[in-house]
């Protein structure tokens, strides 16, 4: 195996790791967005409930 092959393999491993990290970050971002949206919906429902009690 030549040094060029070793470098190519290392570069591919870095690319693969970066792609995996990006995918995980996107998934976490989507989860966070859903959590925030759920929390906002919950707060809106609570506010409406409080306003109905008045």
Image (spheres, grey):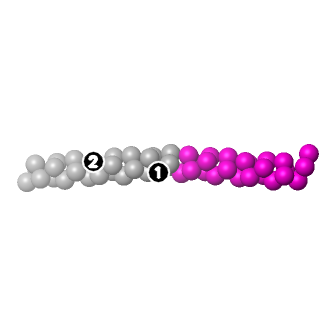
Q: Is residue 37 magenta?
A: no
Q: Residues within 10 Å of mark 1 (few under 14, many from 20)?
A: few
The secondary element bearing badge 1 is classed as helix
- Report whether 9 appears left or right of 52: right
Question: Which is more N-terminal, label 2 or label 1?
Answer: 1
Q: Residue 29 carries which label?
A: 1
> Depth-wise, is mark 1 or mark 2 nearer the camera?
1
Q: Residue 48: give x, y in percent of width and height.
A: 16, 49
Magenta part, dominant SS: helix
Q: Residue at x 57, y 50 (%)?
A: 22
At 67% from the left and 50% from the top, the residue drawn is: 15
Position of 19 with respect to 49 (left or right) is right
User: Which residue is located at x 17 percent, y 48 percent?
Assistant: 49
**Residue range (magenta):** 1-25
Q: Foreground: 15 or 24?
A: 15
- SS at mark 2? helix
Question: Magenta span has 21?
Answer: yes
Q: Which residue: 33% across, 46% down?
A: 38
Residue bearing the label numbered 2: 41
């Amino acid at each position: 195996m030549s040094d060029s092959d070793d470098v190519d393999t290392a570069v591919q491993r870095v690319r693969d790791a970066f792609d995996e990290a990006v995918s995980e970050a996107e998934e976490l971002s989507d989860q966070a967005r859903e959590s925030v949206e759920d929390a906002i919906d919950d707060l809106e429902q609570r506010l409406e409930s409080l306003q109905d009690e008045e």
